[in-house]
Amino acid sequence: MKISPQDVLRALATIKDPDLNRDIVSLGFIKELQVEDSRVSFTLQLTTPACPVREQLVAAAKQAVEALGVRDVQVRLTSQVMSGRGRKLELIPQVKNTVAVASGKGGVGKSTVAANLAVALERAGARVGLMDTDVYGPSIPVLMGSNNPPCVVEGKLEPPVEYGIKIISMGYFLPKDEAIIWRGPMLHRTMQQFLGEVRWGELDYLIMDLPPGTGDIQLSLSQTIPLTGAVIVSTPQDLALDVASKAIAMFQKLRVPILGLIENMSYYVCPQCGHREDIFGHGGARAAACKLGFPFLGEIPLDPAIRLQSDAGKPVAIDDTTPCGKAFGEIAGALAAQISRVNAQEPGEIKLE
Amino acid sequence: MAAVPTTIKLAGPQDTVSIAWSDGHLSSYPYGYLRSKCPCATCEENGPPPNPGTSPSPILGRKPLKPERAELVGRYALQIFWNDGHSTGIYPFDFLHSLCPCPTCTARRAADATG
C-alpha cells in the first residue's frame, strides 16, 4: 500500500500536546514532511526547547506513523519559541517573552531562583536574558559570577554574557559599598533604560528578577511593557505566603498573568543521615496555588550546595545531575510550557485608532 | 476573565471615545465625561478643571476638548493625552468598563447603589 502525506498527517493528528491541549498537526508543529515509499521523515517544531514532554511527543509521533506500516520514520526535533499575540514590545521588539520573578517577602530566594531558571532555560537551548531590576540590592552579578561591566556600543549598553546568558544589573554601575538612594521617577527611568537601551538582541525569554514588595519597580515594569507573566516565589511558611498573595493581587490588578508558584526552601535533607526536615513547613505554596487556581511549578530544597555555589557565582542549574540542578531544570520546563499555554490563550492585539 | 478592549477609537461618533469590549459590549464615552473622570492624583485631589479644553485664543476662541492621542499602558490601562495638555490620567480597563455611560450600565449602577 502506498502511503500519502495526508495519511501521515491524519495519523499524527491523533497526538495531542498535553500543554496546549490540541493536536500537533493543527498546532502547526509538523514541518518538512517527506514521504518516499516506506520512508517518512519530518520535523517536529515545538513552542519551546525546554518542553517537558518532548521525548514523549517524539516517541508518540514515531509510533503513530509506524502504525501505518512505515518502517523507517525519522523525526527531527526543533523549536520556535512563540510570543503572545498581544501588543508588540516597542522597547524590545526582538524579545519574545518577558517573565517577572517576584515575591511578596524579601529573602525567599527570588534572585537565586531567577538566575537558576535563566541558566536552566539556556541549557535547554533557549536564548535567555537576565535583568536584575532590584536597583537597591542587586545580587545577580554575584550569583552569576559576573565581574565584567557592560560596555557602550553604538550608544547602547552591551550586556555581559555569563553561562550563555545576557545580564544587566545596577550592581555593575556602583562600587560595592555605595548605595542607591532614589525615589520613584529615577527607578522608572532606570527600568526604561534597562529595557530600551540595552542591546538584548533576539531573546526567547527575558527573566526579570524583581525586588520584594509591590512598589515603584513592579509598577514601572508592568506599565512600560506588557509582561508575558509573573512567577511567584515563596517559602512554605504561612507568613511568606500571606505576603505572596499581595504580589499576586497586584499582578492581577495590572492584568499580568500569573504563570505559577515556586516553593523555595521547601525541605532539608541532612547530608549526614539522609533525614528530611521540613524547616519552614512543606507544601504551603502548592496548597496556595491549588486554592487560587494557579499552576504549581515545583519545589526547591533548602540545600547548602545552593548557597555555596550561589556565593561562588556558579548557579546549581549548570549541572542537572545534582538534585537541585534537576529541580531547576524541571521547573524551567514547567514554566516554559506554561508560557506557551498563556501565549496561545492570549486575546489578539488591542486596536487603538 | 474580565473584559478587555478589542478596539479603542479615540475619534468615535459624536465626540466620544468608543470601546468595543471582548464581552461584546460597546461603550461610547463623551470626551467631557471621560475627562471629568480622570483618575490621576491631581484630579482626584482637586477635581477636574471646570472648563477643560485649550486656553481661549483671542481670535478663534476656545477649542473644544478632545484627546490628541493615547497609549496602552502595560496590559491593563489606557493613558489619554488631552488637548488641554493633561495626560497624567491612566484609565485601567476595569475602571473604563465600570464607567460605561450607556443606559443599561447606568441603570445597573443605579440599582447596585440603591440595592
Image: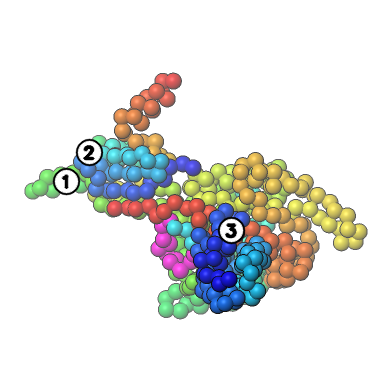
Chain letter of the residue carrying label 1: B
> Which quarter of the figure has residue A110?
bottom right
Q: Mark 1 against mark 3, which lies toward the viewer?
A: 3
Residue A273: image x %, image y %?
91, 59
Magenta segment, prevailing SS (helix, strand or loop): loop
Q: Is residue A200 above or below residue A191?
A: below
Give the camera-side residue of B85 and B2.
B2
Stretch in magenta: A86-97
Amino acid type of the residue that numbered disc 2 sits on in the rendered structure: Asn
Q: Mark 2 against mark 3, which lies toward the viewer?
A: 3
Chain letter of the residue carrying label 2: B
> Which quarter of the figure has residue A340?
bottom right
N-term mark: 1 or 2: 2
Mark 3: give few (<14), some (14-19) or many (20+) Cα within 10 Å.
some
> Which quarter of the figure has residue A64?
bottom right
Label for residue A14? 3
Chain letter of the residue carrying label 3: A
